[in-house]
Amino acid sequence: MLSEQQRSSLGRHLAERVGETIENSGLLPLFVTADHEVADWAARAGFPFVPDPDQGLDEAATIGMNWAMEAKSSWLVLHSDLPLITTNDLTPLQARLDDGQPVLAPSSDGGTSAIGGNQRVQFAYGPGSFHRHLAALSTPAVMATTGLLHDLDSANDLESVLRHPRGEWLRSVLT
């Protein structure tokens, strides 16, 4: 549905938007990325980043979790394909994490949009990952919000987001 140039632009804009939303929520984003342009942008924006070993989402999430755990911090894994996310989506997640409770948010297709805690977990991304992550966490707070439910995994997802009022910003990115 998108040209290579549009896909690249969309990826950069999504990373910027999610990173800025995380920062505006009072959190520190860490970017795990194999994209040099995203890494350069993160560095210019003052965000920490680490290279993605290109071994899949499970390994990338583990790298982020380990980075936070080494800093003696709770962790929250979000992916940059959340075009409708706002600080209002993140505030309740952070409140639960601050109380020591793990958090989990499903995507509309049964995947995982957000997962966090203060203990190590074994990530299990892929179709149906929400239920695998639910089983891996001890009494998580499950959060389902507009910004967390809508991720971009398919052309249908993109069309749905473009029809949503919060998705209007994407129109200018794709033209």
Image (cartoon, helix red, strand yellow):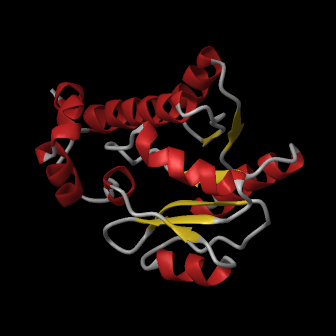
Q: Where is residue 100 in the image (x, y as percent from the top left)?
A: 74, 60
Name the quadrant containing residue 71.
Answer: top right
Name the quadrant containing residue 99.
Answer: bottom right
Q: Is the residue 28 above or below the residue 116 in the image?
A: above
- Pick the quarter of the image with the C terminus: top left
Of 11 and 95, the residue lying toward us: 95
Is 16 on the left or on the right of 96, as rendered? left
Q: Where is residue 146 in the image (x, y as percent from the top left)?
A: 31, 54
Number of numbered tags placed on the structure image: 0
Name the quadrant containing residue 172.
Answer: top left
Of 100 and 129, the residue lying toward us: 100
Q: Is the residue 7 above or below the residue 77 in the image?
A: above
Is 168 on the left or on the right of 120, as rendered? left
Is 112 on the left or on the right of 149, as rendered? right
Of 27 and 34, the residue lying toward us: 27
Q: Is the residue 5 above or below the residue 75 in the image?
A: above
Residue lying at 61% horizontally and 72% vertically, measured from the top left: 140
Q: Position of residue 164 (x, y in %)?
A: 16, 46
Q: Is residue 54 visible?
A: no
Is 171 on the left or on the right of 32, as rendered? left
Q: Where is residue 133 in the image (x, y as percent from the top left)?
A: 58, 76
Residue lying at 65% horizontally and 20% vertically, measured from the top left: 43
Seen as rendered, the residue at the extreme left is: 163
Q: Is the residue 137 above or below the residue 157 in the image?
A: below
Of 112 and 1, the residue lying toward us: 112
Q: Can residue 25 be seen in this view?
A: yes
Residue lying at 49% horizontally and 28% vertically, measured from the top left: 20
